[in-house]
Image (spheres, helix red, strand yellow):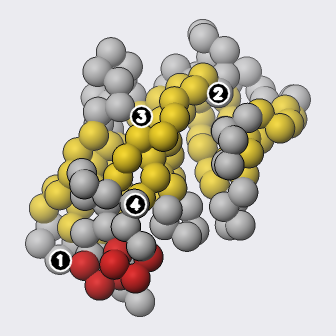
Amino acid sequence: KLAREIISADQGGTVKVWDLTSSKCVNDITPDPKAHSIQAVEVSEDGRTVVAANAHGEVFVWTCLAAPELVESSGCGYSAATLVPITKFRAHPSGTYLLKAKISPDCRTLVTTSSDRTARLWDTTTWDLTSTLAQH
């Protein structure tokens, strides 16, 4: 199956959804107008969760309300109507620089890494911190 959409982010703090068929932006989201520099954007393997993390250690999470079969047939699964914010949290302390955010293949864990030399693991059902790996 071919991907019909791609999600990108920029230094201005905007997350954009691109329709690869038309090469047009079909949705843009600014999770926090005061925050800048989205460092990482990630889509879960099942396509139901989108995560964006900014340089200041904040993580923004959306859920996709469309059923996976609708996403596949429409090619517009991440439109403004189907992408709904569910939480925002600080993953790393102020003054540190967030480097990456990745969702595990089983969609159960988010890992964030930071200039504080930690990797932090988050439960994707509660968004609670489950483990901190020091000296990363």
Marks 3 and 2, how far apart in space? 14 Å
Which amino acid type is marked by label 2? Ala
- Residue receiving disc 3: 38
Residue 13 appears in the picture as rendered: yes
Q: Image point 66% across, 15% down: which residue? A: 93
Residue located at (83% from left, 38% from top): 130
Q: Secondary structure at mark 4?
A: loop
Q: Nearer the viewer, mark 3 or mark 2?
A: 2
* Of pointers 3 and 1, the one earlier in the residue sequence: 1
Task: Tell me the quadrant of the picture where the C terminus can be found.
Answer: top right
Q: What x and y, as percent, mark residue 14?
A: 29, 36
Residue at image mark 4:
65
The label nearer to you, 4 versus 1, is: 4
Identify the mark at residue 92; answer none if there is no mark.
none
**Residue 11 placement: quadrant:** top left
Q: Which residue is mark 2?
A: 91
Figure quadrant of the N terminus: bottom left
C-alpha span from label 2 to label 1: 35 Å
* Amino acid type of the residue that numbered disc 3 sits on in the rendered structure: Ile
Place of residue 111 in the rendered image (x, y in percent of width and height, measured from the top left): 70, 44
Q: Earlier in the sequence, mark 4 or mark 1?
A: 1
**Nearer-N-terminus badge (3/4):** 3
Labels 3 and 1 touching (C-beta < 8 A):
no
Q: Is residue 86 left or right of residue 33?
A: right
Q: Which type of secondary structure does the marked residue at label 2 adopt?
A: loop
Q: Residue at x 63, y 54 (%)?
A: 103
